[in-house]
Amino acid sequence: MKEFLEGSHAVAEIVKRCRPGVISAYPITPQTHIVEDLAQMVANGQLNSQFVNVESEHSAASVVLGGVAAGVRSYTATSSQGLFYMAEVIFNIAGMRLPLVLTCANRAISAPINIWNDQQDSISLRDAGWVQIYAENIQEAVDFHLIGYRLSEDKNIMLPVMVCMDGFILTHGMEVVDIPEQEKIDKFLPSYKPLYKLDPAEPISMGLLADPDYYLETRFALQETLKDVLKMLPKISHEFNTNFARDYKDLLVEEYYTKDAEKVIVAMGSVCGTIKEVVDEARKKGKKVGLLRLISYRPFPAERIYEILKNVPKVAVLDKAVSLGGYAPIASEVKAAFAAKKKSPKLISSFIAGLGGRDITQDSIREILRKLNGKEVNLEFIDLKPELLKESYGG
Amino acid sequence: MEDSSHLFKAGHTACAGCGQSLAARLVIDAAGPNTIVVNNTGCLEVFSTKYPETAWNVPWIHSLFENASAVASGVEAALKYLGKKDNINVIAQGGDGSTADIGLQALSGMLERGHDILYVCYDNEAYMNTGVQRSGLTPFETNTTTSPVGTQSIGNPRPKKPMPEIALAHGIAYVATSSVAYPQDIQRKVKKAFSLKGPKYIQIHVPCPLGWRHEPNQTLEVAKLAVETGLYPLFEYEFGKLTSVRQLQEPKPVEEYLKTQGRFKHLLAQKEVLAQIQKIASDNIQKYNLKVNPSA
């Protein structure tokens, strides 16, 4: 049934229908509405779950780790500093091969403290061994939670999934969304049957010390499984489409007018809605412009990106995060996809925009497209205010 | 050969004379096979579960240094969800550093939320796994690698953090101290703890021959002297009320305990410091009414 819902409420609804038995969270803007809604559902008896109110995000992640280890589907959500405070546990959950879904309401990182959206938080945890998928709109945020649990609990995967949705833009925005029916969800996502769990009937030890004789292979196994996710996501999206009348291609990337494009912007998350409008407008004027939307950031679909962009003359990569002192995170990996390959765009320019919630407008996107007419640029910040730069560093 | 019926088995890699390994075995044997153990990082975790071996014959999990209390909270919540909590005990455990320092926040959260979990702190009074650095439970003027004795220092400048009182302040079902010198006391208290619903905290004094610098065959003697001097009072509180103490016929002077260990050797000639340490013991004796005949 289609409803007009706030993003957070829609996510809480789908999480409820995924039937997690343990939920734990610590409040942080803009994640709060999701967990408040879930707490109310538990309070109203609409959701049978243990809701554990913890004293920190570190403990929230640890509680859900314990919940899954004891064999129960679990859920948590966080943002920004909260995700960073979880970071140690985030790596640990992946290393222990525990399936889980976490919602990251993407938000900027302090200092200066800023509650608004960019993607620096989850991108900074890219090396943790989690699957990271980024929603463009609320409907996708809803669907990705269901897909996330299904992928995470697959016996051949057994890895945690982070569903990333832009803070405020998607968490607090309203949209008409279709929340799948419980009956169909239960068929697509049966109750969690753990491969291993803490059970006195069959005692096992989990989280052992691995010395140099064993550690390397565990990290290799994580890397191999993440490569398998690249094959698994298209299969799951096909099955999802059949069950829920959707039209996802492979959940790795979305191609929007890329086939004959002379200029393509690569981007991730809600900003792609704005980019699509600019592309539509350009196409009407006969300009061959396209968008390559990255959905799965981890695993990174480098081969798909190569195939899509190899004949495109000019590419702009828009990052809503930066590896300070280095390069833009997505741009550096897009460029790496063409290293030592036969074909490559003539130019791959890298742009940073929208940090700390600065609006990325259609004009921002048009400026990026204009800049593709010049020489290749690296790490060009869009929409900087010159008058503020003087204050910042006297430059 | 050790009795194979133990739930914590022989063959682990603890040092000779390790007080913690002995106490851990006593705890889990008292708790029984229907127990899930959640372990902080530390000596016990390292010496009992080096892949591909484990000493644990109960379900056991280790995640990180400071989060056993939170992981155990999740395990307990999952058992409640499954309707299995009434039949299964949950233990969260760690050393003094992971309990009183880095894991205190998670422990406080677990105690405050009322989870039905027993937390066991194995107190060997410093970070032994990393090489004898001082912790919040290191005693006054102890010589450790990060509270060394020097021209400007006579050791750890602060007394032990009052962890049992901190646990008690959460208004929980059960708080007790014990010592590896008294195996029956440990096992009685573990059983008592599991007879009560809600959070409970037991802190067990466990000598570390390497860190305390005594002979491995002196572990139980050293632990016993800590109790007999009044420096490590054994007591138990049920629902906030002191219900028992281990009384002392005639408390021994603290020097008898201090002189058994290299970590206190530098104090033996320092009359003033000895008097301060004697006062810590005397205050304990008075506070917990440890003397059999107080007027004597």
Image: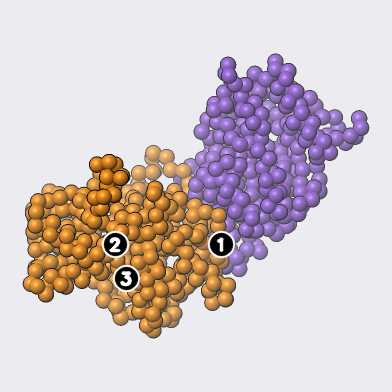
Q: Which residue is mark 1?
A: A52
| Mark linked to residue A359 | 2
In whole angstroms, how far apart are the C-alphas of marks 3 and 2?
16 Å
> In this view of the protein, can residue B210 be seen by the observer?
no
Q: Which residue is mark 3?
A: A137
Mark 3 vs mark 2: which is more N-terminal?
3
Q: The N terminus of chain A appears in which quarter of the rendering?
A: bottom left
- Residue closer to the observer: A96 or B217: A96
Q: Which chain did the image draw in orange?
A: A
Q: Are marks 2 and 1 in contact (CB under 8 Å)?
A: no
Query: In the rendered view, does A285 fall on the left or right side of B144?
Result: left
- Residue B183 occupies which quadrant of the picture? top right
Q: Which chain did the image draw in purple?
A: B
Q: Are marks 3 and 1 in contact (CB under 8 Å)?
A: no
The subunit letter for the residue under badge 3 reads: A
- Residue closer to the observer: A17 or B150: B150
Which residue does the image show at 9% across and 73% down from the upper left?
A285
The secondary element bearing badge 2 is classed as loop
Image position, residue B267 (x, y; %) = 67, 20
Q: Amino acid at mark 3?
A: Asn
Q: Badge 1: how crowded within 10 Å, few (<14), some, or many (20+)?
A: many
Which residue does the image show at 61% across and 54% down from the upper left?
B110
